[in-house]
Amino acid sequence: MAWLKLTLPLCFLGALLVLPAYCQQAPCEVVRKTVPQGSFRLDVEPHDYTPNDIYTVSITGAENASSVIFQILPSENSGGGLWEEGNRLVRCSPSESLMQKNISGSGIRTRWISSSSLNVGSAEIRAFVTFINGTTLLQTRTLAKGNFRRFLGEKWIFATMVWFGGDSKH
């Protein structure tokens, strides 16, 4: 009889842990529905779009989150690039794939490699974060091709000073 008193609370606790994951919607359905803007933060580094570049995609401030679905929307009808963890991809259609990951803590980080196509001028990264209460919220970041000046950074400033006769001593 004592084992029954110990087993019953453990079964109840197990059901509480499994139920949220079991009740979650399929990833393809989540991205097709309109979801409200989230208060968590989605960061993508670097900020500008460059073909065949590696990007770090981070989510922070997602307290009580259970999972995230990442989606890439390229500006042209081309491939969306590759996620670091290809084994977590979900195919929604021949041209659309998502990556789903579980979240532990308040954030997550992954990497994405942009398409090698030179015809793509920008991409939108979407993060659909599902919380333990079943709510799903969205954040987006748009990456556009950077301009020449930003690409060269400090070298451009130095070249401009030399070209126009500028001197840092004057």
Image (cartoon, rainbow, N blue to C red):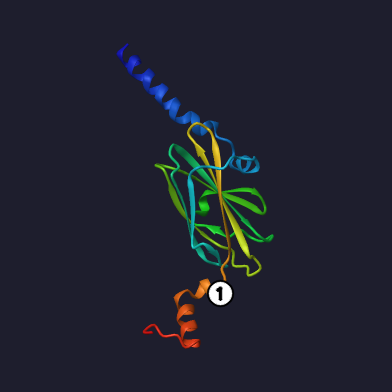
* Front-lying residue, 50 or 11: 50
Q: Quadrant of the N terminus?
A: top left
Residue at far front of view: 170
Q: Quadrant of residue 148?
A: bottom right
Q: Quadrant of the C terminus?
A: bottom left
> Residue 45: x and y, percent?
48, 60
Residue at far left of view: 2
Q: Is residue 104 left or right of residue 27?
A: left
* Front-lying residue, 59 or 17: 59
104 w.r.t. 94: above or below: above
Residue at far right of view: 77
> Residue 102: x and y, percent?
46, 43
> Residue 27: x and y, percent?
58, 42
Give the residue drawn at x 47%, y 88%.
165
Question: Which element carries disc 1, helix, strand or loop?
Answer: helix
What residue type is disc 1 on?
Phe
19 w.r.t. 101: above or below: above
6 w.r.t. 149: above or below: above
| Residue under pointer 1 | 148
